[in-house]
Image (cartoon, grey):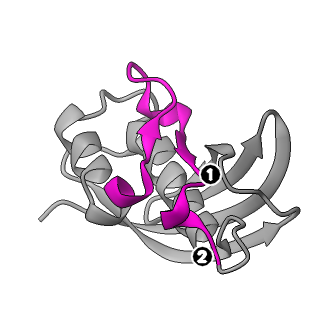
């Protein structure tokens, strides 16, 4: 189903999740949700040292992966997180703008595999592998 139309309502539902709104998540490209997301390292995204909290990175690698997978899902299909593995490569300071992109490595009948990357000013700060279980329509 590569290239299938992406439901704007579903994308908005993802963006409207209270955690995502609280973190200031936005699409990198309104016309192409699969292009990823961006967010500021605001106080909501910081650890006690004033740096980007690792848990926020994990969560948003997953979000970008879901958005990248959307064009690969058929009518009525959905995907739920099966596994996330991430490497935090360098600290990110307060006030930075983080961009998170993902690509679909493989979409099988029941499982999809994505690779995600987080960057600040073009510098790689985190990478991740995300596996999602594809849920068939009922």
Residue bearing the label numbered 1:
106
In the image, the segment drawn in magenta is 20-47
Q: Residue at x 65, y 48 (%)?
A: 95
Per the rendering, the mark at residue 138 is none
Between tags 1 and 2, which lies in front? 2
Image quarter (top left, top right, bottom left or bottom right) of the C terminus: bottom left
Q: Residue at x 36, y 59 (%)?
A: 22
Asked which quadrant contains residue 58, the reply is bottom right
Q: Residue at x 54, y 31 (%)?
A: 35
Per the rendering, the mark at residue 55 is 2
- Whole-percent x, y for residue 43 in the image: 53, 63
Q: Nearer the viewer, residue 96 or 31?
A: 96
Among numbered discs 1 and 2, the one appearing first in the sequence = 2
Q: Nearer the viewer, residue 72 or 91?
A: 91
- Whole-percent x, y for residue 128 in the image: 72, 63
- Whole-percent x, y for residue 99 in the image: 64, 41
- Whole-percent x, y for residue 42 in the image: 54, 55
Asked which quadrant contains residue 21, the reply is bottom left
């Amino acid at each position: 189903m590569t290239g299938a139309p992406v439901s704007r309502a579903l994308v908005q539902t993802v963006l409207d999740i209270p955690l995502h709104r609280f973190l200031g998540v936005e699409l990198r490209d309104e016309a192409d949700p699969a292009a990823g997301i961006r967010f500021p390292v605001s106080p909501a995204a910081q650890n006690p040292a004033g740096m980007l909290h690792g848990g926020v990175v994990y969560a948003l690698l997953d979000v970008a992966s879901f958005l990248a997978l959307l064009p690969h899902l058929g009518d009525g299909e959905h995907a739920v997180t099966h596994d996330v593995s991430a490497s935090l490569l360098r600290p990110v300071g307060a006030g930075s703008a983080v961009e998170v992109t993902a690509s679909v490595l493989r979409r099988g009948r029941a499982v999809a595999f994505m690779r995600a990357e987080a960057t600040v000013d073009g510098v790689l700060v985190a990478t991740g592998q995300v596996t999602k279980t594809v849920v068939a329509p009922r």
